[in-house]
Image (cartoon, coloured by chain):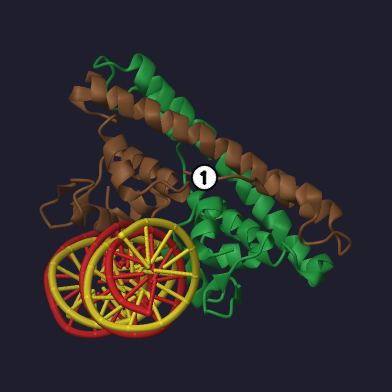
Chain colours: A green, B brown, C yellow, D red
Amino acid sequence: MNIGTAAQQSGLPPKTIRYYEDIGLLRPDRADNGYRDYSTADVHRLRFVQRSRSLGFSVEECRQLLSLYGDKERESADVKALAEAKLAEIDRKLAELAGLRDMLRHLADHCNGDDRPDCPIIDGLAGHGTVQ
Amino acid sequence: MNIGTAAQQSGLPPKTIRYYEDIGLLRPDRADNGYRDYSTADVHRLRFVQRSRSLGFSVEECRQLLSLYGDKERESADVKALAEAKLAEIDRKLAELAGLRDMLRHLADHCNGDDRPDCPIIDGLAGHGTVQ
DNA sequence: CTTGACCTTCCAGTAACTGGAAACCGTAGG
DNA sequence: CCTACGGTTTCCAGTTACTGGAAGGTCAAG
């Protein structure tokens, strides 16, 4: 399929898809006329990258994770370790996102002009302590 | 407190905190010696931005969301509408993140060299159809 | 009173796009 | 067959969001 179709199906603009090819994230076929020709597997990869990027993973992380996704050396120990590490990071992100949702929900529902910026409930939701 | 302390407590590097001031996301006090002086409320904002950024929200989205967080006009209808819209987006992100986790879990656990790149289970987890 | 860790500004570089120009491809209408 | 137009190509420049490094000021400890 052409880049426009791949763009629609992956949720990424054509420009971005070409950019991902430039940096070697993806190697689509070329048709005789020079047009890029994407397989459904390519679209799955693109969609995967779109998701991961929108959730705060870097392109380099995506590149590593793509090696899990359709690579023969998928069973190697370090690739599995990478997956486990990313799973832990995803769980952290899930918790942070849930916290953000609770905080926003609270602000939208209950903080209509009454509470201070340092309202204790918001303080709790905002999270404390040292990070990283 | 100085920028180093604010950095530790927010999880952001000092460079990034200065950058956020450059683009007007934050207006810390200045001590007599010219050093930036951060309040705990400033740190809460920074931590909020750190979280939101790491979860895929843009700086502009953070700027808007910060207006919820400690602003007098918090009760205005459009600000509340913004919060609701962001809540919907967060729920979408939560679902995507959960999907990503399931997919990675599956790859790490069951796809050790046996399954095709277009393994039907992965296909299902990767998500299909048009986005945006 | 010097040393080292911190802070300041400024300027340059990087990552990840994004927009626009100029030209080629491909189909549908006249 | 010609033309229009929508999609595609490459290339180059601009933007967003940092990030690194230089040159110098501040401050508490020894």
What secondary structure is found at the residue carrying circle 1?
loop
* Residue at image point 59% right, 76% down: A31
Residue type, mark 1 in image: Val
* Residue at image point 56% right, 44% down: A93
Along the horizontal axis of the image, is B35 left or right of A6? left
Q: Is residue D2 above or below residue C27?
A: below
Residue B51 is situated, as x and y percent measured from the top left of the image, at 44, 44
Q: Residues within 10 Å of mark 1 (few under 14, many from 20)?
A: few
Q: Is residue A99 above or below residue A129?
A: above
* Residue at image point 70% right, 62% down: A82
Residue at the farthest right position: B114
Residue A92 is situated, as x and y percent measured from the top left of the image, at 59, 44
The quarter of the picture where residue D4 lies is bottom left
Along the horizontal axis of the image, is B79 left or right of A1? left
Residue A98 is situated, as x and y percent measured from the top left of the image, at 53, 32
Q: Is residue A3 visible?
A: yes
Most foreground residue, A32 or A99: A32
* Residue at image point 28% right, 16% down: A112
Q: On the image, numbered disc 1 is attached to which residue?
A: B131
Along the horizontal axis of the image, is A89 left or right of C10? right
The quarter of the picture where residue A60 lies is bottom right
Residue A36 is situated, as x and y percent measured from the top left of the image, at 54, 72
Q: Is residue A95 visible?
A: no
Most foreground residue, B85 or B71: B85
Q: Given the image, what chain letter belongs to the residue carrying mark 1?
A: B
Most foreground residue, A98 or A123: A98
Q: How many marks?
A: 1
